[in-house]
Amino acid sequence: MTQPFYVSRILCVIHKKYIYVYNIYTYVIYIYIHIFYIFRWVVMTVTFKIYDVNNDGYISNGDLFRILKIMVGDNLNDTQLQQLVDRTIFQADEDKDGKLSEEEFTKFIQGSEIESKLVIDLNNAHQQQ
């Protein structure tokens, strides 16, 4: 299959700008990977800002308690919820200052099953309707 002229020209211009792209498929994969990491960063940043209730740049014990209280409703009493909050802060707080920075929050969430729940799989959502 031959490439249309404009595809060859685009790749030539990109090559002159020192992005080494050999064919359109490599370029698409390159863009996809960057979009994936940008999307992941946006999801984590927005999630952090949701949990940072008082907007001070940290998730405090009180911030986490308020958000989790909304999420769990009456399924946990305040004592159980506070224990969950304390345990979460203890596990995620690397510098032991009693609050989570965006970096600590991101490290704690990434790679856990929580991260997979922050993203909606549109393919499955469409099939369930």
Image (cartoon, rainbow, N blue to C red):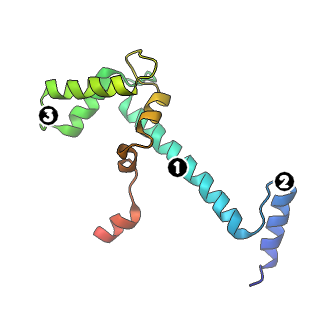
**Is 54 situated left or right of 12 in this image?**
left
Query: Is residue 82 something one can see in this rendering?
Result: yes
Whether pointer 3 and pointer 2 mark residues with C-beta atoms closer than 8 Å, the reply is no
Residue mark closest to the camera, 3 vs 2 = 3
Give whichever of discs 3 and 2 has the lower sequence position: 2
In percent of the image, x 87 and y 57: which residue is there? 16
Label 2 residue SS = loop
User: With 3 as the anchor, is 34 left or right in this view?
Assistant: left
Nearer the N terminus, badge 1 or badge 2?
2
- Residue 25 vs 77, above or below: the answer is below
Q: Are marks 1 and 2 in contact (CB under 8 Å)?
A: no
Position in image of residue 114 (x %, y %) = 35, 44
Residue 39 is tagged as 1
Q: Position of residue 86 (x, y in %)?
A: 27, 23
Badge 3 element:
loop
Residue at image position (28%, 68%) is 128
Question: If the image is split into quadrants, where does the N terminus sit?
Answer: bottom right
Q: CA distance from mark 1 to mark 2?
A: 25 Å
In the depicted structure, whether residue 87 falls above or below residue 28? above
Q: In the current view of this chain or complex, which residue is farthest to the top?
A: 97
Q: Amino acid at mark 2?
A: Lys
- What residue would you read off at disc 3? 76
The residue under label 2 is 17
Mark 3 to mark 1 CA distance (whole Å): 33 Å
The residue located at (36%, 46%) in the rendering is 113
